[in-house]
Amino acid sequence: MIIVDERSGPLSPGAAHARMRASAESSPAGRRGTGRLAILVSAGTILFLIPALWNGHPFLFPDSEHYFIIGRSILSGLARLGGSAAAGSGGAVMADPAASSDAAGGLAAIAGGRSPVYALLLYVLSALASVWWIIVLQSVLVSWLTVTFLDLVWERPRPGAVLAGLAALALLTSAGAFSGFLMPDIFAATFVLAALLLVFDTAASRGKTLAYAGVVALSLVMHATIVLLAGSALVLIALCQLVPFADRHVRRASLLWIGGALILGLAFNAAYLRLAERVSGHPVGTPPYLMARVIADGPGRLLLTETCTPSDRPFAACAFAGRHFVDHNDFLWGSGSPGPNFSTAPAALRTALGAEEGRFVRAAILHHPIAQAAASTRNALRQLVSVDMTEFVIGTHLLVDDAEFRTAAILKTIPKLDRCLAQPGVCPPEAALVPTLQGAFGVNLLSCLAAMAVTALYWALRPRLGADTRARLDRLMLIGTGICLLLLVNAVACGALSGPHDRYQARLAWLSALFMVALAVHAGGPGEARPARKPV
């Protein structure tokens, strides 16, 4: 169909499509669609809030306290930086008493590994408004992306089907728990969903495209591992555009959108580190995760045994020679056995460990490459199936019942925990949720295995399928394959580089359940008819 503008003549296909889309969105039917979306997103938000509401407060983790304190320090530093600029000061701003732990190598030694954006959100909303607001924001974002995703994979599914899918995800998988978690983990999933929508929603309006890109950019500054997911996603998109039948389902500009967001995210993180060092007056670092990993895996420990002698100590890490660490967390935080570790080391040693991490890790791998490869493979495979939810139970327990965290500042923003602080041992209230959380573990694991099996089977059988079946299922199976491959990337990035933790994989595992829900909805028949778009 050729669309003619009365003033400018025939329109190009792209301009015609945009004109038709704008007309549809501004029509009464388009406005009804917006109302439908608002209702479904609102209902989904409530559903994703249910686990935290049932729990009585948002889910916590020891790192939640780190984010809270770092957010407070950032806000204080920005205020002092503004005051210094107003006074005409051109020198570095001195740290205030609240950041005194920085001078001892405490907060500064780990602040580089914590998202400043999430830290600010958590502190500002928790301290100045309510701790629930950040949970509401996370739930709204997850709900909108999920509803939009289901609308994409099946043209306007019936509202009842969407609500059933939202309820299943919120109550039977890890999606609801992570939406109510005072940690940035949920943003790994929001990145994947927004990236998928950028790639496969080829008819998205300019406003939607900008919204998807905004979520991608926001997610990228929430955790370092999301940057690795973004790099892998770019590779997958490029490969997808090389496959003839896949190319027509993919928006070519998605590479530019996601690549641009990745560059902005990396630039923001670099600028933050420089500004934080200027404001605090101290170097801002990250814990030596990779060093902890190779020591826990064995090659690092062997390197220390082989090279560290009383007269020759080529590494600062020689301070731990002969010390047996249970795992990487034991090296970093002393969580497995008594004795010296990174968190209790003097500030000078912490700084030296961070400075030599790359050199130490390379030496450990070069000395024992086969042992490290075998250990990394085991860790990645273990991470792939580690989708348990027990960390949601132990998180508040550590904050409330452990003497080290009893004075955690974030607890003062959660009224319900006052009773827990007054009567140690009565918490955590999450214990009542253990059966439900364990049920989510089962759904997470089964949906991951099912998604991988279904997508592998489809591509194996695709040459035998009819053209109509391929045309109907190709896009959805490309989406499912992307989710499965990013789950594998996540397992390698987190398991091999940091260490297997259930929440690292559980934060994304529910996306495989979303894919299975989408597949079931897609196979269920036609949805509501979209209003016809008339040429203008």
Image (cartoon, rainbow, N blue to C red):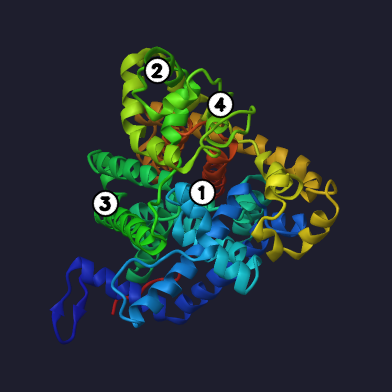
The answer to which of 59 and 86 lies nearer the viewer is: 86
| First-in-chain label (4 vs 1) | 1
**Which label is found at residue 308?**
2
Mark 1 crowd level (few <14, some 14–19, many ≥20, 10 Å Cα):
some
The C terminus: image quadrant: bottom left
Place of residue 195 in the rendered image (x, y in percent of width and height, measured from the top left): 38, 52
Q: Between marks 2 and 4, how big is the CA–CA gap?
A: 21 Å
| First-in-chain label (2 vs 3) | 3
**Residue ID for mark 1:** 106
Q: SS for tag 4?
A: loop
Q: Nearer the viewer, mark 2 or mark 3?
A: 2
Rendering quarter of residue 233: top left
**Which label is found at residue 387?**
none
**Residue ID for mark 3:** 255
Q: SS for tag 2?
A: loop
The amino acid beneath tag 4 is Asp
What residue is shown at x 46% (from left), y 47% (from top)?
Answer: 109
Mark 3 crowd level (few <14, some 14–19, many ≥20, 10 Å Cα):
many
| First-in-chain label (4 vs 3) | 3
The amino acid beneath tag 3 is Leu
What residue is shown at x 56% (from left), y 61% (from top)?
Answer: 138
**Residue ID for mark 4:** 327
| First-in-chain label (2 vs 4) | 2
